[in-house]
Image (spheres, rainbow, N blue to C red):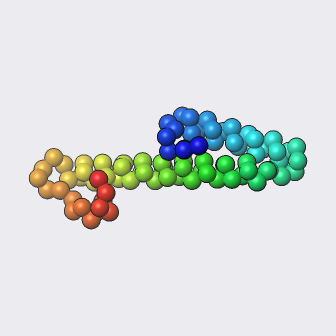
């Protein structure tokens, strides 16, 4: 499944289901199945990627607010070359 195509609510729902599956397996079998752990890690990586992206966007907005609506703009290097 291409996780990047899912919206945040769907991704969070899948993460919740995977966590419940992991808990069930741990209680029932004493350990989680490797496939469940793998899926959960994939979901964690995607959630972390989105959190990082959102944090970067918020930082850029804060920096732009500091510079206001004047012609003075922060250097592109401040943004790491990203818009």
Estimate the x, y position of residue 75 in percent, counting from the top left.
Answer: 21, 62
Estimate the x, y position of residue 34 in percent, counting from the top left.
Answer: 76, 54
Question: Residue furthest toward the bottom?
Answer: 77
Question: Residue furthest toward the left?
Answer: 71
Residue depicted at x 20% and y 53%? 67
Asked whether residue 8 appears in the rendered view, the answer is: no
Report whether 43 appears left or right of 7.
right
Estimate the x, y position of residue 8 in percent, counting from the top left.
Answer: 51, 38
Report whether 51 appears left or right of 61.
right
Residue depicted at x 61% and y 35%? 13
Asked whether residue 66 appears in the rendered view, the answer is: yes
Residue depicted at x 54% and y 44%? 2
Report whether 60 appears left or right of 1.
left
User: Between 2 and 54, which is closer to the camera in this rendering?
Assistant: 2
Estimate the x, y position of residue 56 in percent, counting from the top left.
Answer: 38, 53
Residue depicted at x 59% and y 43%? 1
User: Between 3 and 54, which is closer to the camera in this rendering?
Assistant: 3
Q: Quadrant of residue 9?
A: top right
Q: Quadrant of residue 18?
A: top right
User: Between 3 and 45, which is closer to the camera in this rendering?
Assistant: 3
Report whether 35 appears left or right of 60.
right
Q: In the picture shown, does residue 16 fall above or below 76?
A: above
Question: Residue furthest toward the front?
Answer: 1
Count the marks: how many?
Answer: 0
């Amino acid at each position: 499944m291409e996780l990047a195509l899912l919206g945040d609510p769907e991704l969070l729902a899948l993460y919740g289901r995977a966590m419940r599956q992991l808990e069930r397996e741990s209680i029932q079998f004493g350990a989680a199945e490797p496939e469940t752990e793998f899926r959960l890690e994939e979901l964690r990586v995607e959630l972390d990627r989105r959190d990082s992206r959102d944090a970067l966007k918020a930082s850029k907005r804060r920096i732009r607010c500091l510079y206001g609506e004047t012609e003075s703009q922060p250097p592109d290097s401040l943004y790491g070359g990203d818009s």
